[in-house]
Every structure is written in C-alpha cells, then in structure tokens.
Image (cartoon, rainbow, N blue to C red):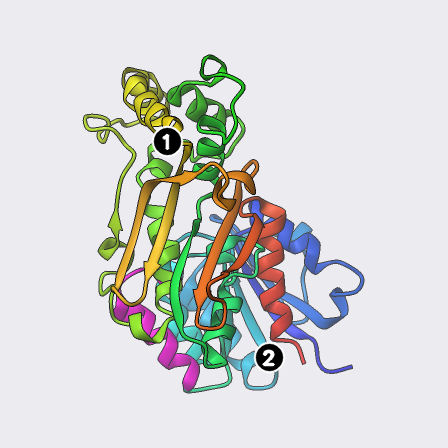
C-alpha cells in the first residue's frame, strides 16, 4: 500500500465531526494519517498521528502560520491535505500559502472561491505551481456532485448555456412548505413568518433567519459555479457581492440584531408574501428562490421566481433538497438535472470526504 496521506483538520464541529467519523471507517482509515486537529480554541499536532480524543487535553492555541510551518516539511516527503471545515475568511485567505508549500486543500468553506477575484486567481495559480490541488465540491451542494459535474462538462469541451436551480437548502424548505404545488386549500397553508419560524426550529436556518433570506448564500454558490465556466471567469470581480441578488428581507428589518426580533417583526409582512403566493397559484404556479447563470447574456442572479406547478422545481423537491439544471450544447433541449439533499452535516462531510479520496493514489 502507498504511504498514507497526512491530513490536517481545522474545525471539529458538526461537519468536522461527521467528517472525522467517515475518515475513521475501516475501509478508509488505512489510507490516511491524521496529523493535526484544531477547534476554535485549541489544537494538537503529531506527525506520527493523533486522534480526536487527544484534542480535549491539548494546550496549544491554533495558529495558521504555525500549522503551515509544521506541514511544509511533510509535503516534501509525501502527500499532505488541509481539510478546512470552517467558514472562516482568515483560513480561506491562507489557502495560496498552503498550496504553494505543496499542501492540498479540501473544504466546504465558500469564502475563498466566492470572494474577490484576486484571491480566487491566487488559489488557481498556486495549484499550477506545484503538486497541490484545491477542491471544494461541498461548497455548492454539500454531497451532491455539482462542482465536479460542471468541471467535467467544461473539460470535455461542452459549452454551458444556462445553469439554473434551487441552491439553498433553507430557502428550498421554506418555499416547498409555503408554496406547495398542490395544496388542499389555501386556508391550510402557513404564513410566511410561521414557515420561517418552523424552519429555524428545525435547524434549517441560521440563528438569525435574515442571514438566509438575504440571498447571499445563493450568491456565493453562483459565484463558485460561474468561475468554472470559461466565458464567465472574470464576470464577478467582487465575487458574490457582484451578483444581482433579490433579498427577501423586508425593508425595515435589515437592522434587526437578533433572530427573535426578526421573526417578531416578520409577522407584519405576512400579507405581502401571501399576496405573492395567491397571484402565483392563480396562474398555476409556485414560488421558488432560484439562482440563474445565463452564459450568453453574462447574467448571474438570484431571485424569487414563479414556476409551473408541474415543473421539476415544484414537484421534485422535498424538505431542504437542492436541484440544479445544466443546459449545455450536449444536454439540450433536455437539461442535466442534479437533485438531492443539499444540506446537513453527514452529506456535507461526504462531499469533503469525496474530494479527499480524489487525492489518494
């Protein structure tokens, strides 16, 4: 068997914990050596191997610079991978340094791939200078094969025409519930604020639901996908901030400091959302918050749209599912559809683990 891959893991929360459980599976464990673990307050490094239980008694504070110094020598004698399970900008900013040192990066962290174009280009360039790679399948659809599918489409010479889909598990759940394709009666449907409140109680939203309703998560995912399409590589210089986004946060609620305050004030806007639902229903439509990448028009946008009640975006989604439609020269007029759970620790960890397995051998 080839030498095990040295793995350094930043972040041991929900996704990180699920990833470590998958890493320990008997079929996978022999291929890897866990050399580093860190939480937000402590870390442990052992080139010979360590385990999660050792982190509880660790006394060192995490340091990106110190980790780079420790991993660089390992990369001269074998494969080393940094697994970033955080959403930290500071960690994302350091990716080029690790890549240049020969350390590959695997992550569900959207920040590096969806921020300013300069950082993204640094990451791309750093991969071409050595043996390292940066992989982020889990940045878009958790465990769904979205990023690699698009990369394969482009690499094999197909031309992307349009990408369209429900990219937020949170907003998927909210509108699947609020605007179903065949309600028994309008009186049985929940109000918008009730739907958001239940979504929060189920753990589908951030503690402050406004962080989901503002559309920024969808904008980040659109940015990541658009940068894979050659014709759109430079279209979003400020990353997700350059995307045309329709926020669902009502005017006057942008300044709510807590999720509780936001939900209390959202009730006053239920009539507005009920009207949108009623208008859509009269046309045989449902409401869905979608992201669109139109290559020919060079448009990247996220907005609330109406779809026929028979459309896959209406009938194929359940819970917090994601669904993406790829229309290309090959997949036209019938697009390629990718659909399934787009959120959750286990499926996100699967996306991360899948990327790590690409680096074995």
Distance between mark 1 and mark 2 Cα atoms? 57 Å
Q: Quadrant of the C terminus?
A: bottom right
| Count of residue discs | 2
Majority SS type along the magenta span = helix
Within 10 Å of disc 1 (Cα), the crowding (few <14, some 14-19, many 20+) is few
| Residue to which mark 2 is pinned | 79
The answer to whether residue 58 is visible is: no
**Residue 58 shown left or right of residue 109 in the figure:** right
Asked whether 58 or 86 is in front, the reply is 86
Question: Taking 245 as reference, is 299 above or below it?
Answer: below
Q: Secondary structure at mark 1?
A: loop
| Residue to which mark 1 is pinned | 283
Q: Quadrant of residue 91?
A: bottom left
Q: Quadrant of the N terminus?
A: bottom right
Q: Secondary structure at mark 2?
A: loop
The verdict on residue 123 being magenta is yes
Q: Which label's residue is closer to the chain start, 1 or 2? A: 2
Residue in view at x 62 percent, y 64 percent: 354
Q: Which residues are magenta?
A: 112-128
Image spot of residue 236 (x, y percent)? 25, 63
In the displayed image of the protein, which residue is found farthest to the top? 187
Residue in view at x 56 percent, y 36 percent: 319
Image spot of residue 213 (x, y percent)? 34, 36
Asked whether 1 or 134 is in front, the reply is 134
Image spot of residue 337 (x, y percent)? 53, 57
Asked whether 266 or 231 is in front, the reply is 231
């Amino acid at each position: 068997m080839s030498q095990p891959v040295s793995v350094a893991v930043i972040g041991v929360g929900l996704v990180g914990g699920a990833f470590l459980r998958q890493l320990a599976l008997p079929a996978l464990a022999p291929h890897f050596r866990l050399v580093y673990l860190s939480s937000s307050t402590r870390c442990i490094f052992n080139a010979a191997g360590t385990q999660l239980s050792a982190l509880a008694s660790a006394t060192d504070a995490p340091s990106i610079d110190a980790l780079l110094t420790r991993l660089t020598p390992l990369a001269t004698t074998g494969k080393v991978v940094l697994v970033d399970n955080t959403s930290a900008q500071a960690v994302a900013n350091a990716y080029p340094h690790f890549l240049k040192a020969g350390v590959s990066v695997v992550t569900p962290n959207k920040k590096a791939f969806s921020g300013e174009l300069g950082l993204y280009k640094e990451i791309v360039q750093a991969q071409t200078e050595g043996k390292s790679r940066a992989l982020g399948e889990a940045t878009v659809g958790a465990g769904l094969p979205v990023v690699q599918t698009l990369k394969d489409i482009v690499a094999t010479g197909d031309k992307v025409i349009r990408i369209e889909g429900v990219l937020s598990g949170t907003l998927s759940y909210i509108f699947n519930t609020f605007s179903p394709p065949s309600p028994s009666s309008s009186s049985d449907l929940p109000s918008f604020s009730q739907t958001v409140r239940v979504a929060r109680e189920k753990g589908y939203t951030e503690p402050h639901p406004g962080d989901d309703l503002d559309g920024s998560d969808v904008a980040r995912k659109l940015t990541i996908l658009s940068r894979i399409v050659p014709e759109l590589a430079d279209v979003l210089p400020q990353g997700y901030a350059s995307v045309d986004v329709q926020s669902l946060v009502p005017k006057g609620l942008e300044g709510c400091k807590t999720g509780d305050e936001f939900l209390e004030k959202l009730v006053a806007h239920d009539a507005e959302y009920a009207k949108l639902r009623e208008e859509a229903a009269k046309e045989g439509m449902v409401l869905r918050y979608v992201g669109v990448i139109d290559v020919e028009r060079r448009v990247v946008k996220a907005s609330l749209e109406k779809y026929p009640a028979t459309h896959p975006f209406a009938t194929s989604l359940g819970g917090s599912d994601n669904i993406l439609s790829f229309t290309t020269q090959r997949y036209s007029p019938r697009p390629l559809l990718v659909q399934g759970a787009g959120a959750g620790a286990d499926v996100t960890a699967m996306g991360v683990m899948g990327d790590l397995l690409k680096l074995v051998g």
